[in-house]
Image (cartoon, rainbow, N blue to C red):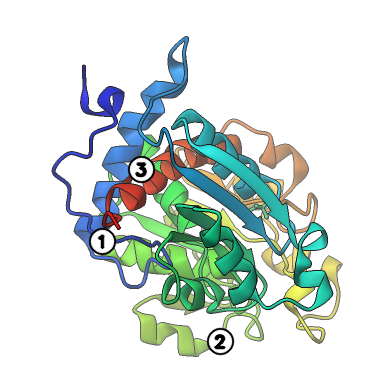
């Protein structure tokens, strides 16, 4: 019986109860998650796609903001690990009656929840709960701050397809200013040794990002031939309070991955997008479904990555 079959935590460089962001993780911790995810990915190919690792534990999937990919992926990951799962959204919780986030989360804990997966529109919401609960808190996206499991599944997919992260040139294109996905990816990629270029209009990709150790350019055409990976981000209409570019048509003309631009990419360049896609805006619809696109591989890998994160954080919980 291997380690995952038994559900017994093995020797890892992981001792955190929570996953709030990538910024605070070491390269070794990121690699531990990616390696654990690789082991869990094989579980999905078996006839019986379950391991007993979290049997007897309860996970609450608390999504205060809409989600398809992340919510489904965490729910399925918890089922695959044999946890009991409850899904709660803002509209069917007592948040609508004025209850605070902390009081709602304390209700979960009073019901012996072991893990709370939180998506919230406010940056810092996951950290706030992590500091106040004994349960593990996993950040499923907090405002424009971080979306750690998205970055982990993105780096997992790059590593799987390219065999490495170190030395690769990754271009992240679009709405960086409002993107938690961009922030988490920047931290993960730099920690693992990639070179990162941020591309977009100056209003959405200010030069101040260079302080993180990335390159900023406002000219997508200038980096196409050199990129190993192009990660296209969605325009975050819900987080923009004013217009940051004249029109969607103008955005696509300057920063959209069109078929003409894709011809200038390296033949083996990966095309990524965290989803949901605005087809025809940040990416041509045929390219999104084309042979260089790994968009659905990202979704598949998200399941293995989230199994790894739940497994590691739950294993790190101190017995009460
Ligand atoms: N990529 C991502 O977070 O998608 P959802 O909003 O559908 O979860």
Residue contact at pointers 3 and 1, CB within 8 angstroms: no
Of the residues under marks 3 and 1, which one precedes in the sequence?
A: 1
Q: Position of residue 224 (x, y in %)?
A: 52, 57
Q: Which residue is drawn at the image coordinates 79% and 49% (left, top)? A: 279
Q: Which residue is drawn at the image coordinates 22% and 28% (left, top)? A: 3
Q: Position of residue 65 (x, y in %)?
A: 72, 63
Q: Nearer the viewer, residue 218 or 145?
A: 145
Q: Is residue 22 visible?
A: yes
Say which residue label 2 marks: 206
- Classify mark 3 as within 8 Å of ligand 1 or not, answering yes or no: no
Q: Quadrant of residue 53?
A: top left
Q: Quadrant of residue 163?
A: top left
Of the residues under marks 2 and 1, which one precedes in the sequence?
A: 1
Of the residues under marks 2 and 3, which one precedes in the sequence?
A: 2
Describe the element under mark 2 as helix, strand or loop.
loop
- Classify mark 1 as within 8 Å of ligand 1 or not, answering yes or no: no
Q: Position of residue 244 (x, y in %)?
A: 76, 83
Q: Which residue is drawn at the image coordinates 59% and 30% (left, top)? A: 291
Q: Which mark is residue 193?
A: 1
């Amino acid at each position: 019986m291997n380690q995952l079959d038994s559900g017994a935590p093995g020797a890892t460089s992981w001792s955190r109860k929570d996953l709030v962001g990538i910024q605070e993780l070491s390269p070794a911790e990121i690699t531990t998650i990616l390696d654990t995810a690789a082991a869990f990915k094989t579980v999905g190919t078996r006839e019986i796609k379950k391991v007993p690792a979290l049997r007897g534990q309860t996970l609450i999937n608390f999504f205060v903001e809409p989600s398809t990919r992340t919510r489904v992926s965490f729910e399925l990951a918890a089922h695959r690990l044999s946890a009991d799962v409850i899904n709660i959204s803002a509209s069917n919780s007592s948040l609508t009656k004025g209850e605070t986030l902390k009081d709602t989360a304390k209700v979960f804990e009073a019901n012996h929840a072991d893990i709370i997966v939180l998506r919230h529109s406010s940056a810092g919401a996951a950290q706030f709960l992590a500091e106040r609960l004994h349960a593990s808190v996993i950040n499923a996206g907090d405002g424009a701050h971080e979306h750690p499991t998205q970055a982990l599944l993105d780096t997992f997919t790059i590593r799987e397809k390219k065999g490495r992260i170190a030395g690769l040139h990754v271009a992240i294109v679009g709405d960086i200013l409002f993107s938690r996905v961009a922030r988490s990816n920047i931290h993960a990629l730099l920690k693992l040794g990639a070179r990162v270029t941020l591309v977009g209009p100056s209003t959405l990709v200010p030069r101040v990002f260079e302080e993180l150790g990335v390159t900023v350019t406002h000219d997508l055409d200038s980096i196409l031939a050199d990129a190993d990976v192009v990660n296209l981000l969605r325009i975050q209409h819900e987080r923009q309070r004013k217009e940051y570019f004249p029109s969607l048509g103008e955005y696509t003309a300057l920063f959209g991955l069109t078929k003409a631009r894709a011809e200038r990419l390296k033949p083996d360049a990966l095309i990524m997008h965290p989803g949901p896609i605005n087809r025809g805006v940040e990416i041509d619809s045929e390219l999104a479904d084309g042979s260089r696109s790994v968009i659905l591989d990202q979704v598949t890998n998200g399941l293995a990555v989230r199994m790894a994160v739940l497994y590691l954080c739950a294993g790190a919980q101190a017995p009460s």
